[in-house]
Image (cartoon, helix red, strand yellow):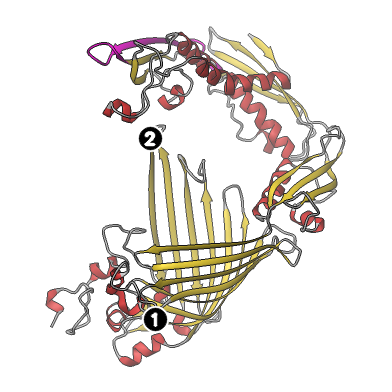
């Protein structure tokens, strides 16, 4: 068999794959709206080795009743045996296997009763996949004029010696086309052809490439309007600087998508479209670009109120200006307050909703607050880094650990995408403040037992931290992921070279990883692990002691469940500081108590 396709044929194949089977599913009714219909209690596939049950169940009409209906019988969605039988399902399965290279696939069905009166059935599809086509040879012509031909053909979906099918042929065609459009060929067209020898279960594939002209960006037209359709507030000059490319640069599809992402990330636009001017023939070596924008509301106020077991009542507000000084800069003014209802002066719920905080009365009796201003520039010197500058003051407490008061804090950071799903960040933070803790905690955990040692820890000090973080994100969906992983790591350090007080020096690295795997179409397994290493700090009795606010704490709902907040290390080690009276909430072996 021989087939040669043009772009229309390629899109027809894609349409067959994406829409034909779902349309068949919709063509028959599996709702139980007729008398004497048989409910489907289960759907199974046997013999399928290359495709799992979730993939196959998505292309057949037959659908079992919902979990609640199958097991509780009273509520949930009831689904019945297709009115036209299983012939269409068998045809759909064979078509699916054929486009994946399996031409000898046989499908049988088994219908078993699932109830005594025959009102419910169990449906099984028995599949004999057969031997697939194997790719004997692969040739690609037409790339001689491409400077980096090796990058275009590297790691393509089709591999000689492996399975071949029309779906893989379409994927290969799209991969070559997309790569050429990324490196300057907007008119690139790929014509695939193949010869299939079914009796021998082998095939040869050939791709004829027409690259078209190597193109560069021409004029860039910015068409923008405000939220009401009137004159925009953000200047077109600022938009041009944010695109990441300019007239005369080599054309790239990736540059267009990156420009769209840059503009969307501002949060200032409700509609963004960065694309080639459709009125221009793509065979030209200079291609103009149109940027169509619709601004969102550029100033907004957000507020929140709530209650939490460790915060009592809390409130916050944020004012945002998305076009600060008319250059698409983002200005944020933030304020937060917590411990309302328990802190001194506002303790109206101390013995009511907030009585849990009685266990942490020393720290929770202080009102926690944050007030700060942040300015984010769209880019740094026209590059891909997004800088941010903040100034703030705050007081925050960590449950049964410390109270940190920052009189003045400054933070400078910059973020950028280092690759697909690979955001990075570098930053510098300078704080002037103090960290307070209960004497028992200072002695037992930080080995500061005398009055002089405690005073040294709790005095006003400078803390200047350099940090860098990197995250790898492969999730298939950022909101409800079913597959992929997220791995993030951060390195932080302080010392006299960063501007810190000598007693505040430390080095810390943390790692946070999460894995998602779909067990069924409705169940997802999620695993998460967090950990870190820290060292440095002021030396006391041979022990290096990092600042309390930078130490690693574990316990509570967000780390090690089953342990109280920040109690894992304390309960594991006990308190070995000699004979003295300790507050009841500290775990102390009986042998150490008075």
Q: Residues within 10 Å of mark 2 (few under 14, many from 20)?
A: few
Q: Which mark, by number, is residue 345?
A: 1
> Which residues are the magenta region?
99-121
Q: Which mark, by number, is residue 406?
A: none
Question: How far apart are the two marked residues, 2 and 1, measured between alpha carbons?
Answer: 52 Å
SS under mark 2: loop
Out of 571 and 59, give the one closest to the viewer: 59
Instruction: Quadrant for residue 48, please give it.
Output: top left
Q: Which residue position holds label 2?
A: 519
- In the depicted structure, whether residue 546 falls above or below residue 515: below
Residue 206 showing in the rendered view: no
Please state the horizontal and vertical placement of residue 497, each as a whole percent of the image: 55, 80
- In the depicted structure, whether residue 220 falls above or below residue 85: below
Please state the horizontal and vertical placement of residue 203, each as a whole percent of the image: 59, 15
**Residue at horizontal 27%, vertical 62%?**
563
Does 460 sit left or right of 262 as displayed?
Answer: left
SS under mark 1: loop
């Amino acid at each position: 068999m021989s087939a040669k396709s043009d772009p229309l044929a390629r899109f027809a194949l894609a349409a067959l794959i994406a829409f034909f089977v779902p349309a068949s599913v919709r063509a028959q009714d599996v709702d139980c709206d007729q008398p004497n219909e048989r409910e489907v209690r289960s759907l199974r596939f046997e013999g399928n080795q290359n495709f799992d049950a979730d993939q196959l169940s998505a292309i057949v009409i037959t659908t079992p009743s919902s979990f609640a209906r199958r097991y509780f019988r009273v509520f949930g969605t009831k689904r019945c045996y297709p009115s036209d039988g299983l012939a269409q399902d068998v045809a759909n399965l064979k078509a699916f296997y054929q486009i994946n290279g399996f031409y000898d696939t046989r499908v049988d069905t088994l219908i078993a009763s699932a109830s005594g009166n025959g009102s419910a059935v169990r449906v099984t599809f028995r599949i004999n996949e057969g031997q697939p086509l194997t790719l004997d040879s692969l040739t690609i012509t037409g790339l001689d004029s491409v400077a980096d031909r090796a990058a275009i053909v590297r790691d393509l979906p089709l591999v000689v010696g492996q399975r071949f099918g029309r779906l893989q042929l379409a994927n290969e065609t799209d991969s070559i086309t997309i790569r050429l459009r990324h490196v300057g060929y907007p008119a690139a067209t790929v014509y695939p052809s193949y010869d299939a020898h079914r009796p021998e279960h082998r095939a040869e594939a050939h791709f004829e490439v027409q690259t078209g002209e190597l193109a560069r960006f021409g004029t860039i037209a910015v068409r923008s309007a405000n939220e009401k359709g009137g004159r925009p507030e953000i200047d077109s000059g600022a938009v041009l600087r944010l695109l990441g490319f300019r007239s005369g640069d080599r054309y790239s599809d990736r540059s267009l998508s990156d420009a769209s992402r840059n503009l969307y990330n501002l949060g200032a636009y409700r509609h963004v479209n960065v694309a080639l001017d459709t009125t221009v023939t793509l065979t030209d070596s200079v291609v103009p670009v149109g940027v169509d924008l619709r601004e969102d509301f550029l100033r907004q106020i957000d507020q929140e109120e709530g209650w939490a077991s460790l915060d009592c009542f809390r409130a916050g507000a944020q004012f945002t200006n998305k076009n600060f000084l008319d250059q698409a800069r983002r200005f944020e003014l933030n304020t937060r307050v917590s411990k309302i209802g328990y802190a001194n002066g506002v303790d109206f719920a101390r013995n009511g909703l907030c009585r849990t905080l009685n266990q942490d009365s020393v720290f929770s009796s202080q009102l926690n607050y944050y007030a700060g201003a942040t300015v984010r520039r769209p880019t740094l010197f026209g590059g891909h880094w997004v800088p941010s500058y903040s100034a703030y003051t705050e007081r925050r407490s960590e449950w049964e650990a410390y109270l940190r008061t920052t009189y003045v804090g400054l933070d400078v950071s910059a973020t950028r995408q280092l690759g697909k799903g690979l955001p990075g960040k570098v930053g510098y933070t300078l704080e002037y403040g103090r960290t307070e803790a209960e004497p028992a905690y200072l002695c037992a955990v930080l080995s500061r037992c005398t009055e002089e040692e405690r005073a040294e820890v709790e005095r006003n000090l400078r803390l200047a931290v350099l940090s860098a973080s990197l995250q790898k994100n492969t999730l298939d969906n950022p909101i409800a992921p079913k597959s992929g992983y997220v791995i993030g790591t951060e390195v932080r350090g302080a010392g006299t070279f960063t501007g810190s007080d000598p007693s505040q020096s430390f080095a810390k690295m943390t790692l946070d990883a999460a894995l998602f795997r779909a067990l069924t179409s409705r169940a997802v397994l999620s695993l998460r692990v967090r950990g870190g290493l820290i060292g440095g700090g002021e030396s006391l009795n041979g022990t290096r002691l990092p600042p309390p606010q930078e130490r690693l704490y574990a316990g509570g709902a967000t780390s090690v469940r089953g342990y109280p907040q920040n109690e894992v290390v304390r309960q594991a080690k006990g308190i070995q500081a000699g004979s003295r009276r300790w507050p009841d909430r500290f775990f102390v072996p009986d042998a150490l108590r008075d």
